[in-house]
Amino acid sequence: MRCRAIISSPPPMTLEEFKKWFMKFNTNNDGRISGVELREAIRSKGFGFSAWWKSIVALHQADKDRNGYIDEFEIENLVTFAQKVLGIKITTW
């Protein structure tokens, strides 16, 4: 008898739910996500060692003002990254 693992994808979330989930990792409550906080968010999605590299790439893509943080206005820049790399489904409704 063969055993197969069933991998279920998480349910889609709205953009607002994505923002709310993401800001849970803002541990110092400064209203923005640092590279370390971003790495923790990525780790929470099951990425281990590669989380540090993915966080560098994500920060580079999302941090448009290059201050080293992702603020509330830049979180939307993470949507494409989250969908392609992390497998998070984000809907518009």
Image (cartoon, grey):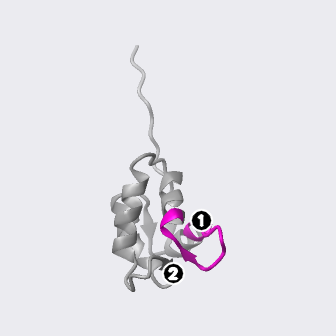
Apparent side of residue 20 relative to residue 49 in the rendered image (left or right): right
Q: Position of residue 93 (x, y in %)?
A: 48, 75
Where does the magenta region start and end?
A: 22-36
Apparent side of residue 23 relative to residue 59 in the rendered image (left or right): right
Give the CA distance from mark 2 to mark 1. 12 Å
Main secondary structure type of the part rendered in magenta: loop
User: Is 47 in front, or is 20?
Assistant: 47
Mark 1 is surrounded, within 10 Å at the Cα level, by few (under 14), some (14 to 19) or many (20 or more) other residues, namely: many
Identify the residue at horizontal 60%, vertical 80% (top origin). Answer: 31
Q: Position of residue 56 (x, y in %)?
A: 38, 64
Residue 3 can be seen, yes or no = yes
Residue 86 can be seen, yes or no = no
SS at badge 2:
strand
Q: Is residue 35 magenta?
A: yes
Identify the residue at horizontal 65%, vertical 71% (top origin). Answer: 28
Identify the residue at horizontal 33%, vertical 61% (top origin). Answer: 84
Apparent side of residue 58 relative to residue 12 in the rendered image (left or right): left
Q: Is residue 72 magenta?
A: no
Q: Position of residue 18 (x, y in %)?
A: 52, 69
Compared with 14, 74 (above or below) is below
Q: Amino acid at mark 1?
A: Phe
Q: Earlier in the sequence, mark 2 or mark 1?
A: 1
- Res. 4 image quadrant: top left
- Res. 89 image quadrant: bottom left
Q: Which residue is mark 2?
A: 71
Q: Amino acid at mark 2?
A: Asp
Q: Which mark is residue 74?
A: none
Mark 2 is surrounded, within 10 Å at the Cα level, by few (under 14), some (14 to 19) or many (20 or more) other residues, namely: some
Q: Position of residue 6 (x, y in %)?
A: 45, 35
Q: Which mark is residue 25?
A: 1
